[in-house]
Amino acid sequence: MIVTKYAPQAVKQSSVYKRLMKKRLQWKLRKEVNAADPLKVMLGAGPYKFDGWLQTDKDILDVTSPDDWSILFEPGSIDSLLSEHMLEHLSEDEARSALAECYRYLKPAGLFRLAVPDGYRRDPTYVKEVAPPADGHKMLYNIDSLMALLQSVGFETTPLEYFDREEQFHAVSWNEKEGMILRSIRFDTQQAFQRDGLFYTSLIVDARKH
C-alpha cells in the first residue's frame, strides 16, 4: 500500500498508517539533524517556527520515549533545546523521564531553555487558564518545584522570569537568540491577563548540562 496524504480518513486513523507516517517524518527530520550546525531543537513546537531551530512535536518526538530520542539524535549531540509550555502536559514521572533524556542528548554545557505556567501567580483569570486539568495540563509548577525537578536530573539552573512564593515578580535580562519564549514579559500582550505592567507571564528557566 502506498501511503499518501490522499489516503482515506479511515486509513489515516489506523495504527499502521500512524506508525508509517511517524517513521517518514522521523527520517526527514534525521536528515535535517545531520545537516544542522549548531543543532538547536524545539520540543512540543506546535505551530511555532524560529530561524535556526528544528521543530518537533509528539507526532515525531515523544519526549518520554527513549526510542524516539535514539532514532533522531546521538547522545551528547544537541547544542540547545527549547520548550514553551510543554512540560506541564506531562505527569511528574513523565517529566522526570523526559528531562533525563534532554540531559543525555545535550552536549556538555548545552542549554535547555524552558517555560511553563507559573504556579505562584495567583490572580484568578490566570489560575483558571493554567491550573490542571485546563488545556490538558497535568502539573502546575512553581519556581521551587521546577528548579528541584531540573536539578534532580543533573541540570544547573538559572531562573529568568518567575513569581516567588510571596507572589513578587522577578526577571533578569535574557537573549532571545538563545531561545525565544513568546509568553514572557517582553513579548506577550494578551490583554485578558493584564496585571499592572504585565500580561501573560511564564515561569522561565535556563537549565544547563554540566
Image (cartoon, rainbow, N blue to C red):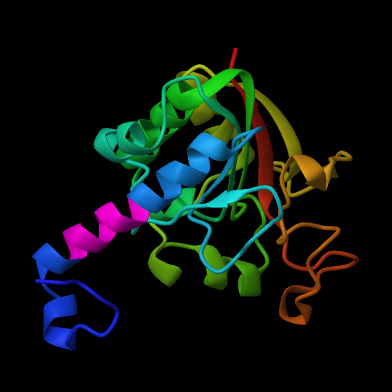
Q: Which residue corresponds to the image point at 35% horizontal and 57% vertical from the top-left? A: 25
Q: Is residue 23 visible?
A: yes
Quadrant of res 47 = bottom right
Residue 181, position as x, y percentages in the image:
71, 54
How many dots with numbers? 0
Name the foreground residue: 100 vs 116.
100
Q: Please state, as top left, top right, bottom left or bottom right, where the C terminus lies in the image.
A: top right
Name the foreground residue: 17 vs 90.
17
Residue 22 lies in the magenta-colored region:
yes
Name the foreground residue: 11 vs 163.
11
Residue 120, position as x, y percentages in the image:
64, 50
136 left or right, relative to 113: left
Q: Specify start and end residues of the magenta stretch as a single range.
A: 18-26
72 left or right, relative to 177: left
Residue 24, position as x, y percentages in the image:
30, 56
139 left or right, relative to 196: left
Quadrant of res 113 = top right
Query: Looking at the image, is 122 positioned above or below residue 96?
Result: below
Q: Which residue corresponds to the image point at 25% horizontal and 76% vertical from the top-left? A: 4
Q: Which residue corresponds to the image point at 69% horizontal and 48% vertical from the top-left? A: 52
Residue 180, position as x, y percentages in the image:
73, 51
Q: Is residue 61 visible?
A: no
Q: Main secondary structure of the magenta part?
A: helix
135 left or right, relative to 22: right
- Outermost residue to the front: 2
Q: Please state, as top left, top right, bottom left or bottom right, where the N terminus lies in the image.
A: bottom left
Q: Which residue corresponds to the image point at 68% horizontal and 44% vertical from the top-left? A: 204
Residue 63 lies in the magenta-colored region:
no
